[in-house]
Image: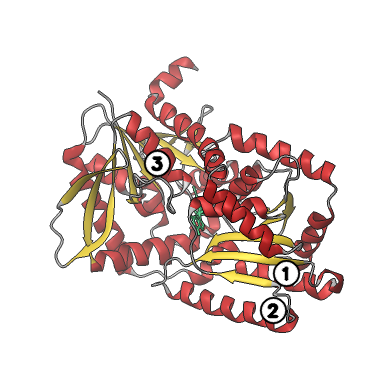
């Protein structure tokens, strides 16, 4: 029987207790794995003195997970190094923050080999393997080198950069070559797919055939965009929970009649938080009549604390937020509420619902699920307004949002003003169109369409065509 095997850096199926901080992606993958009696394989997040290749199997929330421990050197070179100091900034167009060291590259390769070697004995002849994200690009190649003939797919959650940006990575051609070990390569957007094909044609002599099949490096892969969504049905249920309602009420009370602008992000330089704060400062500077009438609630949960760029960003955000409040706060009004602690999913749902404006202004983002969650949380009778960066993957389909250039503080400030003044009729019309998209293109559709295409051999596609 064919099983689905999902491989990702970290494995986080929802605990049996349901809520917690697990996101929609983990929920969706878990649902598929439960249905197929599948397996979720990845790093345990723990490091051991000496690598043994031992994997521990557990059942979490009905999903079978296989966890591998790594060494501290692996964590430094593969995770904090190549994944988060090299690929993450590069793929988000931050070449200024890219740190490239040979040891990172070696660690990345070593861990991908370790993943391949330990996964190998668990693979049955008909299993379908789905590899997730930039941490594991070479895994398909390593599995093929070890004789795996199964269908293997890869999905990139972050943007694929423009050709000349990617070319700044040493051994970029080898990284792309390794992708051609997969039967199916999935990206978030049409723009990412085009950028990949541009590279493949110009720098890898690839032949792009009509049905998305690309021939390069002696292999054939199918390349396609699969925009990820949220688990809309589950989100709707969460929104109806007592906890969500408690939090909505709590926020309405603390608003005290003021309009609430909301940002929810991992504390990451790709999310454009400094630029967002500056835009808000511009708004306050330009429109004194708004003082006391609104506030920005920015929830920014700490992430990747051991990487310097994240510590630097945190320090800068602490400073800017202090400056804004120092300059504009009064004894009875705090213009910026900047919060670093995480909230439970149900609490967050209630907070979203109470917001008048969702401010989602990343400088680059693969998709951005916060934009979709904000829409899903709104009251149909009186919805809030989504302000969305043109550089989020979500902007490709969420065209009814107020689309902004996050680098222009004036543009963003004006969009906030426009959102605050938007008549109910227009808010409803925009929201209805956005909501339809969020509900239709949800995470199950993303998962099912990817897995379905992965199951279809390229030869069959060619015959059908
Ligand atoms: C990567 C790509 C792509 C945030 N704070 C809390 C919390 N969150 C949840 C949000 C949302 C998720 O984290 C963030 O998702 P994003 O999509 O915005 O961003 P990344 O984490 O960077 O994800 C991104 C995504 O992968 C999926 O492919 O869209 O482009 O970068 O679900 O709600 N959740 C809880 N408490 C918090 O305080 N419970």
Q: Residues within 10 Å of mark 3 (few under 14, many from 20)?
A: many
Residue 360 in view (yes/no): no
Badge 1 is on which residue? 280
Tell me the quarter of the image containing the N terminus.
top left
Quarter assignment of residue 128? top left
At x 62%, y 43%, the residue is 376
Task: Pick whichever, 292 or 456, lies toward us.
Answer: 292
Frontmost residue, 392 versus 261: 261
Residue labelled 1 has its Cβ within 8 Å of some atom of ligand 1: no
| Viewer-side label of 3, 2 | 2
Secondary-structure class at tag 2: helix
User: Does the beta carbon at disc 3 come under 8 Å from ligand 1?
Assistant: no
Q: Residues within 10 Å of mark 2 (few under 14, many from 20)?
A: some
- Residue identifier under label 2: 324
Q: Is residue 149 left or right of residue 291?
A: left
Query: Between marks 3 and 1, how big is the CA–CA gap?
Result: 39 Å
Give the numbered dot on residue 451.
Answer: none
459 lies above or below 18 = above
Q: Name the residue that disc number 3 marks.
A: 154
Q: Is residue 317 above or below residue 367?
A: below
Q: Do residues under tags 3 and 1 come within 8 Å of each other at their CB atoms?
A: no
* Residues under numbered marks 2 and 1 in contact, where contact means CB atoms less than 8 Å apart: yes
């Amino acid at each position: 029987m064919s099983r689905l095997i999902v491989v990702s850096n970290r494995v986080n199926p929802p605990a049996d207790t349901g809520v917690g901080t697990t996101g929609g992606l983990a929920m969706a993958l878990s649902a598929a794995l439960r249905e197929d009696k599948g397996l979720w394989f990845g790093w345990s997040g723990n490091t051991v003195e000496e690598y043994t290749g031992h994997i521990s199997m557990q059942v979490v929330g009905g999903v079978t997970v296989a966890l591998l421990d790594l060494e501290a050197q692996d964590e430094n070179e593969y995770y904090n190094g190549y994944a988060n100091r090299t690929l993450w900034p590069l793929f988000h167009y931050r070449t200024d923050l890219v740190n490239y060291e040979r040891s990172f590259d070696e660690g990345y390769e070593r861990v991908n080999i370790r993943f391949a070697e330990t996964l190998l004995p668990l693979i049955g002849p008909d299993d379908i393997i789905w590899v997730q994200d930039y941490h594991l690009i070479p895994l398909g190649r390593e599995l093929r080198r070890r004789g795996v003939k199964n269908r293997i797919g890869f999905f990139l959650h972050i943007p694929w950069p423009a050709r000349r940006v990617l070319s700044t990575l040493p051994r970029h051609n080898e990284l792309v070559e390794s992708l051609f070990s997969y039967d199916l390569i999935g990206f978030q957007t049409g723009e990412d797919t085009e950028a990949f094909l541009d590279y493949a044609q110009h720098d890898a002599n690839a032949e792009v055939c009509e049905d998305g099949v690309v021939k390069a490096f002696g292999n054939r892969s199918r390349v396609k965009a699969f925009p990820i969504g949220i688990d809309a049905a589950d989100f709707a249920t969460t929104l109806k929970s007592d906890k969500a309602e408690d939090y909505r009420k709590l926020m309405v009370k603390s608003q005290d009649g003021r309009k609430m602008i909301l940002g929810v992000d991992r504390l990451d330089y790709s999310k454009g938080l400094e630029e967002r704060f500056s835009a808000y400062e511009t708004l306050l500077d330009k429109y004194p009549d708004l003082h006391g009438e609104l506030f920005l609630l920015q929830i920014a949960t700490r992430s990747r604390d051991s990487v310097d760029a994240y510590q630097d960003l945190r320090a800068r955000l602490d400073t800017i937020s202090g400056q804004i409040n120092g300059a504009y706060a009064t004894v009875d009004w705090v213009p910026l509420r900047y919060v670093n602690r995480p909230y439970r999913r149900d609490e967050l749902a209630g907070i979203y619902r109470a917001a008048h404006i969702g401010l989602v202004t990343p400088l680059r983002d693969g998709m951005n699920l916060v934009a979709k969650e904000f829409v899903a949380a709104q009251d149909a009778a009186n919805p809030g307004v989504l302000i969305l960066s043109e550089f989020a993957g979500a902007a490709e389909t969420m065209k009814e949002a107020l689309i902004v250039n996050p680098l222009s503080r004036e543009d963003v400030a004006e969009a906030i003003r426009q959102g605050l003044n938007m008549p109910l009729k227009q808010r409803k019309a925009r929201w209805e169109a956005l909501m339809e998209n969020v509900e239709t293109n949800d995470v199950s559709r993303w998962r099912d369409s990817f897995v379905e295409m992965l199951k279809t051999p390229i030869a069959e596609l060619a015959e059908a065509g």
